[in-house]
C-alpha cells in the first residue's frame, strides 16, 4: 500500500497537477500494484487519507489530480456539495416512503440539509 507521500510524489512527478491531466484510480492502483480488480477501493482509501492529511487532491470524471488553482478547488467543492445534496435527497425520500407506508411505526429521524452556496 503506498503512503500518502508516495502518492503525492507520483502525482507531481507524472504531471497530474491540473484538472486536464488526471489519472484514474485504476491506473494508480496498477502503478502501486494494489489493484482489487474492480473499484480500486484500496487506492481510493489512500486518496481519502491523503485528503484528510491536508493534501489537495481533486477529481473529475476523468480521474484524480493535484489541485493547483482556486477554480479547481471551487469546482471540487461544488461537486462535493452536489453529491452531498443528492445523498440527502435519497435519505429524505427513503424516510418519506417509510413513513407513508408505515403510519403506525414512523421514523423520527431529523431531516438534514446542505447549506446553500453563498
Image: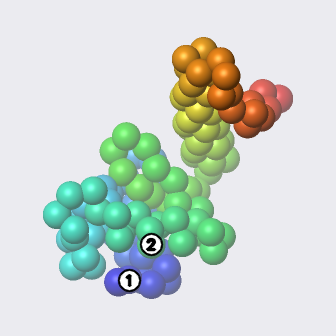
Q: Is residue 38 left or right of residue 50?
A: left
Q: CA distance from mark 1 to mark 2?
A: 7 Å
Under tag 2, what secondary structure? helix
Can you identify the residue that label 1 sits on?
Answer: 2
Residue 70 located left or right of residue 39:
right
Could you classify mark 1 by the number of other residues whose Cα lies within 10 Å: few (under 14), some (14-19), or many (20 or more)?
some
Residue shown at the point (68%, 27%) measured from the top left: 106
Q: Nearer the viewer, residue 110 or 76?
A: 110
Q: Is residue 46 above or below residue 5?
A: above
User: Can you give x and y, in whole percent of width and height, for residue 62 in the image?
Assistant: 33, 44
Find residue 118 and report its horizontal and vertical position in percent.
82, 29
Q: Quadrant of residue 107?
A: top right
Residue 89, given in percent of the width and then of the height, sits at: 60, 26
Front in this rendered view, residue 96 or 73: 96
> Mark 2 or mark 1, which is nearer the start of the sequence?
1
Residue 99 location (% of width, % of height)? 63, 21
In this view, which residue lies farthest toward the left?
37
Which mark, residue 46?
A: 2
- Residue occupying the point 55% across, 17% down: 101
Residue at left offset 55%, top offset 56%: 67
Q: Residue furthest right?
A: 118
Q: Quadrant of the N terminus?
A: bottom left
Contact flag, marks 1 and 2 (Cβ < 8 Å): yes
Amino acid at each position: 500500500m503506498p503512503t500518502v507521500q508516495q502518492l503525492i510524489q507520483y502525482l507531481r512527478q507524472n504531471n497530474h497537477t491540473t484538472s486536464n491531466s488526471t489519472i484514474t484510480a485504476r491506473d494508480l492502483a496498477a502503478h502501486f500494484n494494489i489493484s482489487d480488480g474492480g473499484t480500486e477501493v484500496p487506492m481510493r482509501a489512500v486518496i481519502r487519507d491523503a485528503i484528510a492529511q491536508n493534501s489537495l487532491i481533486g477529481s473529475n470524471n476523468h480521474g484524480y489530480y493535484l489541485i493547483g488553482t482556486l477554480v479547481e478547488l471551487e469546482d471540487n467543492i461544488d461537486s462535493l456539495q452536489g453529491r452531498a445534496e443528492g445523498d440527502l435527497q435519497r435519505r429524505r425520500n427513503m424516510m418519506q416512503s417509510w413513513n407513508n407506508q408505515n403510519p403506525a411505526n414512523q421514523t423520527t429521524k431529523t431531516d438534514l440539509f446542505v447549506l446553500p452556496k453563498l
